[in-house]
Amino acid sequence: MNLNNIYRLILKDGLRNYKFRNSHLKLEPSADEGKRGAIFAYRSKANMIKARGIVLTSMEAVSENQDSFTHWTPNVYRYGSYSDEKRQITRGHAEENLRQVNTFYIDFDITSSAEEMTSGDIFTAAIDLGFMPTLILKSDKGYQAYFVLDEPAYVTTHSQFRVVKVAKAISQNLRNYFNQTLPVDMTCNHFGIARMPRTENVEFFHADYTYSFQEWLDWSMKQPDLPFPSKKPNLTVIAGSEGVKQIDEPWYRLLMSEANIRGAKALMGRNNVLFTLALANFSSGVSQSDCENVLADFNGHLAEPLTQDEFFKIIASAYSGKYEAASRDFVILLCKAWVNKNLKASDLFVKQRWYKFKKKRAERKHSHLHEWKADVMAYLDGFYQSEDPFIQTTKKAIREAINIPERSLDKVLKALKADNKIFFVVKSGRGGGIRLASVKAIVLSLIQVKKERQEAYFDNIAAFFEESLGFIKSVMERVRNGLKQTKQVSLFEADIG
């Protein structure tokens, strides 16, 4: 594994090739490279938190410090500087200073022993998404997945920084998608500091899994959960319902009444709660001094109150004019984390859209076909192992496991096979039963099979399910075509073992 190849793929043309001064690779000054940007890097998490880092403006400097940094900014800024005379405290990593967006990344945080996951879980979700991660890093408390663009998305003043707004919406949709099944950190900055690829933390890397900004845009526009800037730009934040101030909404009162809010980052703690409450005051027309008085009382009743300096800094940030109001998505996350995890939007906001809901499945006598399909796929996912995705069991065992009628099971199996979701074959007689596997699970297994072993692997699949080799390959090819790979590299030809 060559870390420099990873760095170049992520950073694109954002940095110079050589250091402007004291280059060990080029004897002549590198002015001919033209104007480029800067990134920030930190040697430890403790230093990162204190903003004690280094400004890097060349690939040479990045390469020289290989494996000595733990965190960096993979998206490139226009410039970087220091705010102290000793040149230790970095300055310039703000959204308005972004030069180009190179990658989206997701932080998967395992915060308790009850939460377990592997990189295979990320692949499983990614297959359904249609975009494979370019890079997966392993950390002490989880994983970080990079989805690298094939070309950078440049930020220009001419477009009024629209690229940043659109990219942030895409990034939010991507987090929302993975958060359905995995523990995603929903609070970290979309274009801020991430873990840096190092020799010991790269768990997966495939240079061909890159996608265009347009592909991500097309996908994001189809997501129903998060309003998109190009459609209704003001819906990413809410200032209450018409004629209703945020401070008069139920969520505000619920958070203001909660004293047991602590500072743990993974739980979206007191800093985030206080900032959200301050934004509510700002959007409601409350003066900064009145806001300080109201929230000082709230802070004083906390089990772990903020220091006075931290308190005033957060209020000042909320009133800086950079923000409009408290984010609806963030309000829901905070209230579920600190008030009651079962709270619904209707419990938190004054005016709701009305929807006609279907009767809950538990209240119905019969289930829909799509529900039985989901049950069977969940059953298969529960058995999935990366080295052996094949299951040999009986129909009776499946019926008992998911409480499905016999005729419904037969119908579902045929439908899933027609959808290229599963392979299965029924064996009669002594020692018979059913053999089945999720096509998705087989794809994930193939990712880990070396090129020279793949043909034999296909033969084994065909023999196990008593199907022709051509049929097996055609199904797998259709699944491969479902992945939006701009370079059209075969999933089954890449040697990544």
Image (cartoon, grey):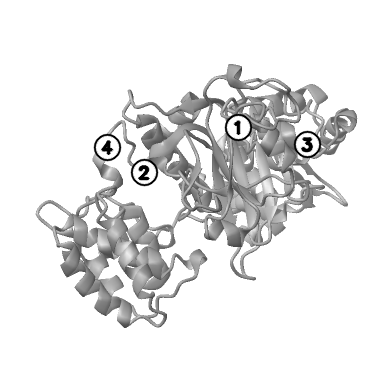
Q: Secondary structure at mark 4?
A: helix
**Residue annotated with mark 3:** 446
What amino acid type is highlighted by mark number 1? Leu
Residue 93 rendering spot, x and y as whole percentages: 47, 44
* Residue found at the far left of this picture: 243
**128 to 48, vertically: above or below:** above
Choose mark 4 or mark 2, whichever is in front. 4
The label on residue 328 is none
Percent x, y for residue 281?
Answer: 20, 62
Name the quarter where the C terminus is drawn.
top right
Precedes in sequence: disc 1 or disc 3: 1
Residue depicted at x 71% and y 29% = 476
> Distance of mark 4 from mark 2, alpha carbons?
11 Å
Q: Amino acid at mark 4?
A: Pro
Categorize mark 4 by other alpha carbons within 10 Å: few (<14), some (14-19), many (20+). Answer: few
The residue singled out by tag 4 in the image is 233
Foreground: 439 or 493? 493
Q: CA distance from mark 4 to mark 3?
A: 42 Å
For disc 1, the marked residue is 11
User: Cα distance, mark 2 to mark 3?
Assistant: 34 Å
The residue singled out by tag 2 in the image is 226
Asked whether the viewer can see residue 259, the reply is yes
For the residue pair 394 and 139, the one nearer the viewer reads as 139
Amino acid type, callout 2: Leu
Foreground mark, 2 or 1, reads 1
Separation (CA) of disc 2 from disc 1: 28 Å
Contact, mark 4 vs mark 2 (Cβ under 8 Å): no
Mark 2 near mark 1, Cβ–Cβ under 8 Å? no
Per the image, label 1 sits on a secondary structure element best described as helix
Residue 335 shows in this picture: no
N-term-proximal mark, 2 vs 1? 1
Looking at the image, residue 229 lies above or below residue 284: above
